[in-house]
Structure formats: C-alpha cells, structure tokens
Amino acid sequence: MQVLSGRKKKSNEEIIEQIIMEQYNQYYRLAYSYVHNEPDACDIVQNGAYKALRASHTLRSQEYAKTWVYRIILNEIFNYLKQPRFESYESLQEKQAGEVGDVGDECSRIDLQRALDSLPEQEKVIVTMKYFEDKKLDEIADILNENISTVKSKLYRSMKKLRIQLADDPII
Amino acid sequence: MEDYRLEKEHGKARREEEFKALKAGYLKQKMSQEQLRNLQLVINQAKEENRRERNKARQIKGAVGAAAAILAFVILPNTSPKVAYAMEQLPLVGELVKLVTFRSYEYEDEMHEAQVEISKLVAEQISKDGRQQKNLNKSTAEINEEIDKLTAQLLEDFQIHVREELGYKELIINSEVIVSTPEYFTFKLSCYQSEASGYETNYYYTIDLSTGKRLKLGDLFVEGADYISEISSYIKEQMQRQMAENQGKIYWINSEFEDMDFQTITGDTTFYLNEKGNLVIVFQEGEVAPMYMGIVVFEIPSEVLENIRK
C-alpha cells in the first residue's frame, strides 16, 4: 500500500476528471481521425467522459486511471463506428476526394490519408498513437491490453502497408 | 537502374514528408471553447449523479447500520475496534456442512467504516462414510484457509488506511449461503471495498456433498465432454443479444481488440449452481466487460447442457 503522509489521497472521481481535463484534445483528435466531423467527435468525447466519471467507483487502481479512461474513449469510438447510421470509410473517402481537387502534393497526401483510414481499426490506432501522439510502445500496449511484441508487429505491418519507413524510426 | 533507385529514394522521402504533414493536420484538431464548455457541463452532470447516488447509498446503509449496531452491542460491549470471537452459530444450513460466523469486526469513524463478518465452514462429524467425512473435513479446512488469507489481507489494508489517515475507506465483507441441497452446498464470500468509489469481488465455494469434495466445473460433466466450448459459445451469444437489446451493455466481444475479447471460459472460471440446479458463470469486474458493468453473471439454461451434464 502506498503511503502518502500528510496529503489527502484524491478520490477516483477527482483523478478521472483531472485526466479528462488534461487530455480532452487528445481524445478529440483521435475521435476526429475516425469520424472526420466535429459534432460526432465531440459526442464521443462527451459520452466517454460521462461514462468514465459515472464508472469512477469501479476503477481499481489509480495508477491505471489514464489508461482506463483512454480505453473507455477508444471503446466509445469503435462503438460509434459500428452504428449503422454511421457512414463507411469508403463513402467518406469518396466524398473527400470529391471535395478537394486533384492537385499535386495535396493529392498524394490524401492518398496517404486514405491508406491510413483503410487500415484495420486497431492498426490505425497504433500508428496514430505512436507517430501522431508520440506515445511509447509499452503505453500503447497497456491501452490496448496487448503485449508489446504484438503491438510492434502490428505497427511494423501497418507502416509497411503505408509504404513508409521513417528515417528516425527506433523500432524497425 | 540508377534513375530507378533515385526515384525510389525520392518517393520514399516524399512519403515521409506527407506523413509529417498528416501528423501536423492531425494535431491541429482541437475542441473549441464552446465544445469544451459543453464537455465541462457533461462532467458536472456525471459528478452530480454520482453524488446523488452516494447519498442514497449512505442513507440505506445508515438504516441497515442501526440494526447492525444493536447486534454488535450484544456481541461487543466495547465499541472500540477490536476483533470479537463470536462463534455464534447461524441456523443450520445443510446437514453435513454449516456456515458459522466466526469473527466479526466493526469499525467506524468519520472517514472509515468496516463491517466485516468472517464466516467459516464447519464439517459436522456425522457421516457414516469414512472417506466422505475425510473429504469433507479436508474441503472445509481448505476453504477456511482461503477465506482467512483473503480477509486478513483486506483487513490489514483497511487498518493501514486508518492508521496512515489515507482518506475515506469502507470495507464490507460477508458470506451468504447460496444453495444448500442434499447434493450441493454453495456459499458466496462477498468483499466490497470503497475509497469514494468501490468495487466488489465475489468468490463462490461449492462442496459436492455426495463425495465431500470441492466441486470443480469439470465435475459437472460427463467424461470427455467439451463443456468449455458449449458454455463459452452460449455466453458469447448472450453477450451479443444483450448488447443488441441494450445500448448501455458492453461486453468485450467482437471488438477491434481481439486479444482483449472474451474467448472462452476455463476449468477454473468462477461458477455456482443456483437453486434450480442451473449452472451460473460469474465474471469479476473488468473480466469480460468494462469495469462499470460490475460483476456479470450468466445462467446457463439446462437445455444447453442436457446432453453433457452428469
């Protein structure tokens, strides 16, 4: 048992609220990268935050709180995508391609965006967390409840699919 | 050849640049002030609902506490925290095995509250079958030792919490006989811990009274039957059905995190037999569903297992 002499221990609720208020943009960005629109991304963050707080009494270990909230948000995202009213990637991508003219660099960046979007959900999460959010592999493994080697191999596979080999890549 | 290599190099570099641009685009997404305010509102609402629930729980507990306090007074004339060796026998439960409240421990101050009843199994020495009696004695001793270990640890945590003034903590431990038939005796040890938020763990112990041995899941089925697959697939079906019917229910199944998904029960999965004799599979908090789903149980209808149950 951890001893915090003189300092009152924070309640789960306080800790979870604090984490959400520190990380909400991170959750939002991640949600946005899946749903590609503001209202849905906001809904996801709000629902996730609500569920996390309402369930705060079920958090077993406060050390685990950050990972726990992140998991709830991820679940929220994936459940959102499963809803039938939600548009498929393909239709979204077609729309995007239509909106932006096929002009030079912009065009190939959209290709890359499409390639990223067409990765399996979990692979996309790993790439996003690793390279966009700069999370460490062990943290990603914790969030996904996977072992590090699985995360590593999925990351490797996805980067191959994206045909990217980053110069300063520490894992490959 | 050289041109091809250069072009390939060039393509690679360009793709890296594009990837960086994607990252920049990704990081640009931020919630607006108004969206943030809405989030704050939702957070406040959740906190308010939590507060109301806590108050309600406290009121109910208060009422129960009053009755318990009278009982405690009889057993413990002294209100200071101390362990009472009560040896108070509860009504007879089953002919061969009894659940007896062995010790009770109560503590309450402004920040801490414990209501702990530690029960033990007592095997009556009435069996005419020497082997059955020996098994009964062994099973009860084994279970008692497990309960001792579990509760001692929880009590110690609680006492450290009080001593070190680590803030609000509540501990409730009690046992309950779930089923007592001529065939089986099952009781539940329920451990609830809370530090402004709480979680519960339930343990089930079943003794097969015909042999006197502790009942393992596999013992229920005929030799060689693949009960694990049968039960697992029924549970998966139920999970999916419940999720389809109720948006609020979430189980780890068919999610994107395959490794996290519920795959199968094991021979050591927690279970008990209910009063109908049906098998009930128990999953602790967080085992097959998000923590907020709490402890989840699945009753397996007898039809599902009729071909393989002993």
Image (cartoon, coloured by chain):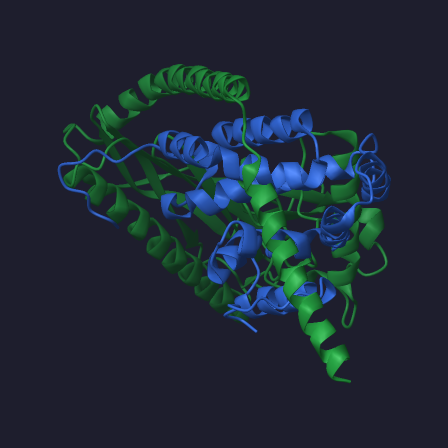
Viewer-closest of B203 and B1: B1
- Residue sticking out furthest to the bottom: B1
Count of all numbered marks drawn on residues in the image: 0
The answer to whether residue B297 is above or below residue B69 is below
Q: According to the rendering, which colour does chain B have?
A: green
Residue A140 x/y as whole percent: 52, 56
Answer with left or right where residue B39 lies relative to residue B308.
left
Where does the image place residue B10, in percent across and percent down from the top left?
68, 68
Q: Residue at x 54, y 40 (%)?
A: B291
Quadrant the N terminus of chain B occupies: bottom right
Q: Residue at x 49, y 17 (%)?
A: B37
Q: Quadrant of the C terminus of chain B?
A: bottom right
Q: Nearer the viewer, residue A132 or B151?
A: A132
Q: Which residue is more in the foreground, B308 or B207?
A: B308
**Residue B229, picture quadrant:** bottom right
Q: Is residue B289 left or right of residue B231?
A: left
Q: Is residue B206 visible?
A: no
Can you give x and y, in whole percent of width and height, for residue A89 in the image?
81, 43
Is residue A2 something one can see in this rendering? Answer: yes
| Of the pair B1 and B118, the residue shown nearer to us | B1
Residue at 65%, 59% (x, y): give it: B259
The tint of chain A in the picture is: blue
- Give x and y (percent) for residue B195: 34, 34
Kindly identify the residue that appears in the image at 86 percent across and 41 percent down.
Answer: A94
